[in-house]
Amino acid sequence: MKKILDLITEETVKAFAAAGYDAKYARVTLSNRPDLCEYQCNGAMAAAKEYHKAPIMIADAVAKELGGSKLFEDVQAVKPGFINIKVSAGFLSAYLNDMHKDERLGFEKAEHPRTIIIDYGGPNVAKPLHVGHLRSAIIGESVKRISRFAGHKVIGDVHLGDWGLQMGLIITELKERKPKLAYFDEGYTGEYPKEAPFTIAELEEIYPTASARSKEDTAYKEAAMQATYELQHGRKGYQALLGHILNVSVTDLKRNYVNLNVEFDLWKGESDVQPYIPDMVKEMEEKGYAHMSEGALVVDVSEETDSKEIPPCMLLKSDGASLYTTTDLATIVERMKLYHPDEIIYVVDKRQELHFIQVFRCARKCGLVDENTKLRFLGFGTMNGKDGKPFKTREGGIMRLEYLIRSINERMLEKIQESRPMDGAQAEEIAELVGLAALKYGDLSNQASKDYVFDADRFTSSEGNTGPYILYTIVRIKSILKKYEETGKKLPPDAEIGPYRSESEKALMLELVKFNAVMENAFEEAAPHKVCAYIYDLANAFNKFYHETKILGAEDEGLQDSRIQLLLLTRKALETCIDMLGFEAPERM
């Protein structure tokens, strides 16, 4: 189904041609003066230069041609050369009925679906999720859902941090605590235990203890580096321990991500791509891309057009150890081999931009990706406290993500019980749904690249541009529809959305018809905040319509049926959008 702007533009193209002017000037946009018209065309201003005529003369001629179209109620040429367009009530309702009949609201799937891998999440194993992981998880999840709605094959990868010194630190600390474990006996040849020698709680205590000690004890740090080296070079006992660390940690990570309504198709980590590194590095050396520099193996990635220095991409340190750049490049090698993606999107902190410039350039220079494979960096800003600094606990530490979620849910529970007391279990279930909406919408309504202030009071408010306000609007629609059903009435099979009868009804219709254009734009720009802006405008338009219009008390049944259909479509649009944002609405609030 074509976007409404495309249909209007098609009519304008015909009008420009009929008036004797080039169709390239026929572009139509949303009006920047909605008090005067709904759509506008400013092409006559540009055409005036080519045709050496006053813009208003061209606009007058085009407006005259448009005057006969059934799509428009009114077309006016306004000095100095604007063409102001108002759509007809019949055209608007017909378009909405076509949307309503389609389960995708008329949004067509991509004609040529692409395979897209989205790299988001990025937690380190053996450490709990904290607020720093929030943005990657929920932005990545929303971009994934929007991309799937657009018709593409999308693979979400958590990309675990499960390699490097942190593993060596855990192994070293565990060895000091339990030196008699079989994993530390190099002569051991039997089967290693299936049960991990630690719980998730113990594991989460072991790492920070080891990390703190390594900063003060040089010998301890050297032992950890040696353990890391032996792990990376295949020591069986240490690799068995790595398996335990992953099993215990990933089980806990999955539980926390479920609470965020975030799902991954792949639970791969840096350790999975280690087998690719030797051949990748060897090929880079043999083809002359990699060379030694100050003891390290690097690939030069600077370009003549660089306005600032881009350092070489380091592959191996002087001791032969790999780095994040190495594992990120090897991950690209694996992804190309296993999934052949047309695009890989990295949803990470924008402060890592230089790292990904190096990785992307190295991957292209060394031929790790196909020529047409797109590598995309979607950098996000920080979540800050009210003091404008990165969000911390009252004690100054980094808050665990599950504590943040719990605090939002508790705040929502208090508000629910204050406004409308209900059964405890039901209230808690609603609080979890609304709390998640508050958290996700509070984040996603901001442009991803920008920092934002986490304001729990504002995010959990049922008024203003918030998740609870959006859910409250959906619940209001559900309540009206339920009352309609309770009257015993049923919509006739041929019931349709009729022409608008009021300005607020028209305004709601005009918001609904933007759906396709918004979804297309949100996908192309990987911009969930555009979906948020759309549903906020749509919710506002509906609530104004609700307050000003009789729905169940409409003058006649035909009008009531029309407005019930309009409500059904509005609910469908809102619910489709919040699903792409990663949350859902309760039945009541």
Image: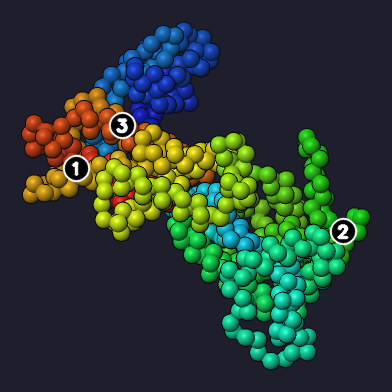
* Residue in front for this viewpoint, 468 or 286: 468
- Asked whether the residues under the numbered discs 3 and 1 touch, taking CB atoms below 8 Å apart as contact, a structural biologist would say no
Q: Which residue is mark 2?
A: 296
- Asked whether the residues under the numbered discs 2 and 1 touch, taking CB atoms below 8 Å apart as contact, a structural biologist would say no
Tag 1: Cα neighbours inside 10 Å, few (<14), some, or many (≥20)?
Answer: some
Check disc 2 and report its element: helix, strand or loop. Answer: strand
Distance between the alpha carbons at the discs numbered 3 and 1: 16 Å
- Whole-percent x and y of residue 398? 61, 51
Extreme right residue here?
294
Q: Earlier in the sequence, mark 2 or mark 3?
A: 2
Looking at the rendered structure, the kind of residue marked 1 is: Ile
Check disc 1 and report its element: helix, strand or loop. Answer: helix
Considering the image in quadrants, where does the N terminus appear?
Answer: top left
Looking at the rendered structure, the kind of residue marked 3 is: Ala
Q: Residue at x 31, y 18 (%)?
A: 75
Distance between the alpha carbons at the discs numbered 2 and 1: 68 Å
Q: Earlier in the sequence, mark 3 or mark 1?
A: 1
Of badges 2 and 1, nearer the viewer stands 1
- Whole-percent x and y of residue 335? 62, 63
Extreme front residue here?
395
Q: Which residue is mark 3?
A: 541
* Residue in front for this viewpoint, 414 or 223: 414
Residue 141 visible in the snapshot: no
Is 238 on the left-hand or right-hand side of 138? right
Q: Which residue is mark 1?
A: 480
Is 200 on the left-hand or right-hand side of 589? right
Give the answer, above or below, for where 115 lies relative to 279: above
- Whole-percent x and y of residue 453? 54, 38
Q: Residue at x 53, y 54 (%)?
A: 401
- Asked whether the residues under the numbered discs 2 and 3 touch, taking CB atoms below 8 Å apart as contact, a structural biologist would say no
Give the answer, above or below, for where 192 lies relative to 369: below
Tag 3: Cα neighbours inside 10 Å, few (<14), some, or many (≥20)?
Answer: many
